[in-house]
Amino acid sequence: MSKLSQKDIRQAMIRSMCYQWRSFSYETMQSAGFTKFITPALQTIYDNDDEVVAAKAQKYLSTFYNTENTMGQIIHGAVLALEESEEEDVTETAVALRTGLMGPFAGLGDSIFKVSNKVILGSLAGYMALEGSPVGLILCIITSIIFNVFVRYWFFMSGYKQGVSFITGQQSMIKGLTSAVTIMGLVVVGCMIPSTVKISVPVTYAYGDAVQSVQDILDAIFPYLLPVLVTFGIYQGLGSKKMTTVRMAWLIILICIVLTFFGIL
């Protein structure tokens, strides 16, 4: 029979969402927040046996743990379910599970919740803002709330209800979803380039009475070639260890001023 009531589980879930990053150690990263989330539940499960609870909390606190916040809720729910079984050496099993899955789940979670969704929704919000519409920003805020509250709640409860079987059985589905969302994000970025990166060459040359624009020639060869090349160059530059976002912004401003002064752009 479960020792944790629905109220206990909900409170554990709330602590899990609140303390994963707020309680942080540079030695063991998120282990402090994880321990803060699970210790009150351990006290209920093990009938406030301080010696047992302290030993288990020390194991969670002393081992390294770091993963993405949203996907990590599945691990937290599953660990809570394992501890509730009260089997011998269950904490060692839970720590091993946590350690083994934090890396893959960090990669999956970062791809879906930290990169792809922000690229897609942020690009949409930015484009609609250029058109004078706040709808994109509102949609971005609403979606962020959904991801940060409802999706985390569902992940935690799914991990708790289905335990380890959820994690092992759903990995192929999650990996497929990650690939799909990543591709969608790249497509959105590519589609946004022509409408947001405005670059044109005003240079013309005359041949007799005919005047030809360099920009028209470039558009005939490859429409929006310059925005694509500039975007590619910026991404390549940001991949350099010595280049930062601030340096790149100042570099773009400087290049634009110089090229505009000489009439090239």
Image: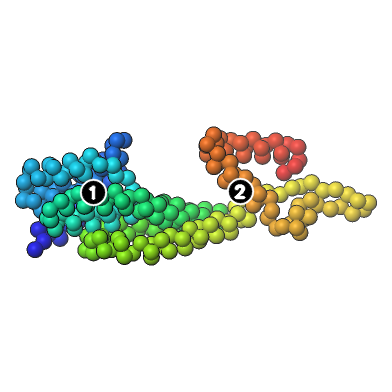
Task: Estimate the x, y position of residue 207 in percent, counting from the top left.
Answer: 91, 51
Tell me if mark 2 has few (under 14), some (14-19) or many (20+) residues whose alpha carbon lies within 10 angstroms of its own.
some
The one nearer the camera, 112 or 208, is 112
Residue at (28, 39) in percent of width and height: 28
Task: Indicate which label's residue lies in the foreground, 2 or 1.
Answer: 1
36 or 204, which lies in front?
A: 36
Give the Cα distance between marks 2 and 1. Answer: 44 Å
Q: Quadrant of residue 222?
A: bottom right
- SS for callout 2: helix
Kindly state the secondary structure of the residue where label 1 is placed. helix
Quadrant (top left, top right, bottom left, bottom right) of the C terminus: top right
Q: Position of residue 213 (x, y in %)?
A: 80, 52
The answer to whether 57 appears left or right of 226 in the picture is left
Q: Is residue 66 depicted above or below 122 in this figure?
A: above
Q: Nearer the viewer, residue 1 or 70?
A: 1
Disc 1 target residue: 95
| Other-residue count near label 1 (Cα within 10 Å), few / some / many at <14 / 14–19 / ≥20 | some
Picture quadrant of residue 50? top left
Relative to 199, 181 lies left or right: left
| Residue 115: % across, % down | 45, 52
Question: For residue 253, which quarter of the picture?
Answer: top right
User: Amino acid under label 2?
Assistant: Thr
Quadrant where the image shows the N terminus: bottom left
Which of the numbered marks, if any, corresponds to residue 241? none
**Is residue 67 shown to the viewer in this render?**
yes
The residue positioned 12% from the left and 42% from the top of the image is 54
Q: Residue furthest right?
A: 208
Q: Residue at (5%, 51%) from the top-left corner?
A: 47
Most foreground residue, 98 or 200? 98
Which residue is tagged 2? 231
Percent of width and height locating residue 121: 47, 56
